[in-house]
Amino acid sequence: MGVAAAEGAPPPPPHPRAAWYINVLCTWTLSLLAFTGRIRDLFWTRPKTRKGFAEISDPHQDFYNRRLYGRIHDCWNRPIASAPGAWIDVMEREDIAGSYKSTRKLAFTGRRQRCLNLGSYNYLGFAAADEYCTPRVLSTMEAWGISTCSSRAEGGTTPLHAELEGLVAEFLGTEDAITYGMGFATNSASIPALCGPGTLVLSDALNHTSIVAGVKASGASVKVFRHNNVRHLESLLRFHIAEGQPRTHRPWKKVRLRAWGCMRAARGAAGAGLCEQAGVDPRDVDVLMGTFTKSFGSAGGYVAGSKRLVAYLRRHSPAHLYAASIAPGAAQQIISALKLIRGDDGSGRGAAKVAQLHDNANYFRRKLLEMGLHVLGDWDSPVMPIMVYHIGLLASLSRRLLSRRVAMVVVGFPATPLLLCRCRVCISAAHSREDLDYALDALRDLVAASGIDFANRSGGGLRGLLARLTGRAPPRGWRAPAGGAAALAAELSAPCGGCGEGACGGLGSRRASSDGSSCSGSAVVSGGSSSIADSSSCGASADISRPGSAADSWAALAPSAAKSV
């Protein structure tokens, strides 16, 4: 499993939590933007809706789009002009600078920028041309056309669909499977067929919106448990089974548990999903749902289970009865990818892709954690949300990464709460180690500049604030003095007791007091500047290079830092 493969790496944080000053700064920034936006709206007349007609947009949503989102909307909807492989061509757009551009579409410049792709769900690298899959897809399109133009219940079922469903059931270890032409509809149209009034649904707090839409449409009673919190789930289950249905307290007709990602492919040794990874027999799970978009480079989704379940869905699921079936080319792409993963081609490329994806994901996650970033998710998972928290930092990171030729998705409100903005990394088996190191180098530079290394002791709290105010980090063992600002200023300006020369700006004495060792750092003087030759010996996290001695710099910066604190 991925945990075993990632031995020696620091564990991920149990839950995202920003440093206190980040929340304060973010709240202040958003409040200031909202206040100035309201002032500006006093001199701007919003187009009025004709009498008797509904509002085109909600006034609050319109304000957010114009005054907040409009300032950074260049960080989203960037068009590409190539297949979403390891590297993509991003079409350049005009600069957003200028308030008049904040609410309109950005024009194209006609240029393209080659960027490392860290934003596409392309786990096994099938989204680009493949020597095994692509020729078969092209021949299928010549034989069967672009689309069936019909639902599965009418004229949209072909031998390809029957073969696909048989392969899916065999691959997952279930009796039967049914496929859909749209991944979203797999959940939103199947759940109402399986649940209804009198059904208790226990749903994860972070379930996909397709599950949320399906549960709402079913009319079932929904109880939400905290994300991945089994104890909370058990307490809800015990309480509501004992209570029964609302008002009548009759027993529930059905009890359903909905968790997103249970059958995500590319997990487990053979890539068969979380059931394989966790050692669970798929036949012990009533309903298995999944998508073909992320691992197979195609479109659509599936539901797998018993023959009785699948037969019921074929009779009652609206997406099977009325929606268009999977296009023949898309179906052939899934079939070819499944055969490649199972090794039916005799090459072993499929197993190598799964292993490469796990190695890439664990390597990249380990390096991100070593940087001190708040990274969500589990080992072996190719999706890695990096918590940024501050919406201003979010836009800055997106633009600066693009300037470094790294294309990464950023996610903010309303997709996430206001104070839980994040970047999202998507790793692929198509990435080489050189590609990952290139992205890590770009991220490392931006992390140092933006200070989002919240998991490090130098990244959060008072110590992180001092590092950003003074330009350098105090030593690892440093703790804020109890005497307040005056004592802090005195400590920062104190001479070094380890080297006796003041070369490390007093850092050596504080390290000596923290771990019992003495400062062995030597001052390197060149052209009237002083720097630390061996910064690790005296606990500094970065080289110091400023006019005058380092001790003088600390003494000069300490009063302003203490005053700011």
Image (tube, helix red, strand yellow):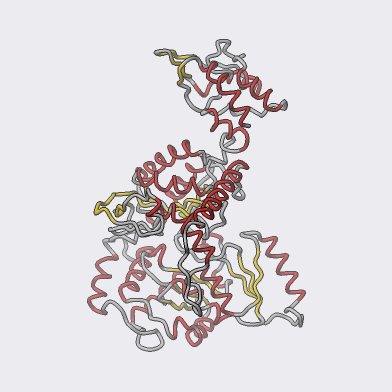
Measuring 44% from the left and 60% from the top, which residue is drawn there?
Answer: 266
- Asked whether the viewer can see residue 179, the reply is yes
Please identify the residue farthest to the top as the structure is shown: 500
Give the image quarter of residue 470. Answer: top right
The one of 31 and 476 positioned closer to us in this rendering = 31
Instruction: Find residue 197 and report its horizontal and vertical position in percent.
Output: 64, 82
Total numbered circles = 0
The quadrant of the picture occupied by the C terminus is top right
Can you say whether 11 is above or below 67 in the image? Answer: above
Give the image quarter of residue 319. Answer: bottom left
Can you say whether 303 is above or below 525 in the image? Answer: below
The one of 552 and 84 positioned closer to us in this rendering = 552
Instruction: Find residue 10 and report its horizontal and vertical position in percent.
Output: 56, 42
The one of 22 and 452 positioned closer to us in this rendering = 22
Measuring 34% from the left and 46% from the top, which residue is drawn there?
Answer: 405
Please identify the residue farthest to the front as the structure is shown: 43
Can you say whether 462 is above or below 278 in the image? Answer: above
Measuring 50% from the left and 85% from the top, which residue is drawn there?
Answer: 311
Instruction: Find residue 376 and report its horizontal and vertical position in percent.
Output: 54, 51
The one of 50 and 153 positioned closer to us in this rendering = 50
Measuring 77% from the left and 74% from the top, which residue is drawn there?
Answer: 242
Instruction: Find residue 289 and report its horizontal and vertical position in percent.
Output: 50, 71
Relative to 139, is 126 on the left or the right?
right
Relative to 302, is 110 on the left or the right?
left
- Asked whether the viewer can see residue 428, the reply is no
